[in-house]
Amino acid sequence: MSIRLIPLTDPDYKPFSRRIAWLAAQADGTPVGSAFLRLNSRKAQAHLGDLEINVHPAERGRGIGSLLLGAVVTGAREHDVRTLITDVDVNSVGDRFLQRHGFVIGLTLIYARLDLSTRTPDVPEVPGYRLVSWEGVVPEELLQTFTDARAGMNDAPSGTIDAGVDVWDVERTRHAAQLIEQRGERLTVVAAVDGTGRIAGFTEVVVAGDGKGDGQNYGTAVLPEHRGRGLALWMKAAQIHETRRRFPDLDGLLTDTVDTNTAMRRTNDRLGYRPQYEMHRRTLDL
């Protein structure tokens, strides 16, 4: 096998991460595969590296994937990455490849879809709270409390993966919404506000700029002191109604949930989400 690995400069630079890349090519320069390693610059997640490997279907079985993985492992160690992470379809060729190379299952994600043409069940209001909604960047008067509410995701089930504490500040909150807008997509948020005017929980949906196809659920969280009252169900039901109103041509909503997150899975089931497929989040300790 005469395969060259060519390190590349990847232009996919983000404020809190960057990627390094390799191209696998035959002797005549024909590309046959690629690998990407995303490095996290946030201190709490600097030990994690996100891996992506692709090999042309016609070239598989020649050891190209193993060659690319070796380059990624070396590069990860050079950048002080301690754990590689990648998502792969359960029981796929990629899943078996990773297993052979020592990757273990850190968690399993269940991907589900809601058909927006189906009826959403009635959900009662939660006494002591009110719902607010917005599109794009959060209104200034809610910026700090919305940022604080993101702490509700810190104890979300993460399997055996040490993901660290994901710290947010107001600048990151603004920037995350602005990035979605720059991609040509639309972010909508529904939040529950308690009697003191602070956000107790929220749920986010991102929709393509033309308002068609399927939207994607992003974060949903309720702060610990407000749990057990039905806020997640109430917010997500309101988000579905809001999405139908804003995007009448949208077909459905997609969501992914860790298989051990029984509370969120139960909420999604009640709202009409139906499982579509599963993915393993596999990890390799270096």
Image: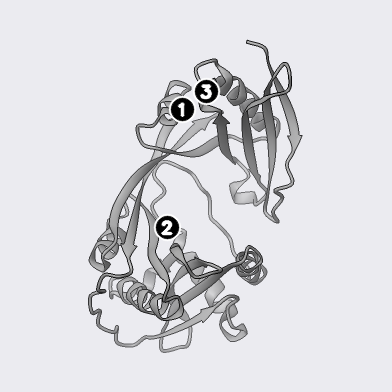
Quadrant of the rendered image containing residue 14:
bottom right
Res 98 label: 1
Question: Which element is circle 3 on?
Answer: helix
* Residue type pointed to by label 1: Leu
Image position, residue 139 (x, y; %): 59, 83
Question: 206 or 109, which lies in front?
Answer: 206
Residue at image mark 2: 155
Q: Are marks 2 and 1 in contact (CB under 8 Å)?
A: no
- Quick one: quadrant of the C terminus? top right
Q: Nearer the viewer, mark 2 or mark 1?
A: 1
Residue at image mark 3: 58
Q: Residues within 10 Å of mark 3 (few under 14, many from 20)?
A: few
Q: Nearer the viewer, mark 2 or mark 3?
A: 3
Image position, residue 260 (x, y; %): 31, 50
Q: Residues within 10 Å of mark 1 (few under 14, many from 20)?
A: many
In the rendered structure, which disc, 2 or 1, sits on the residue that comes first in sequence?
1
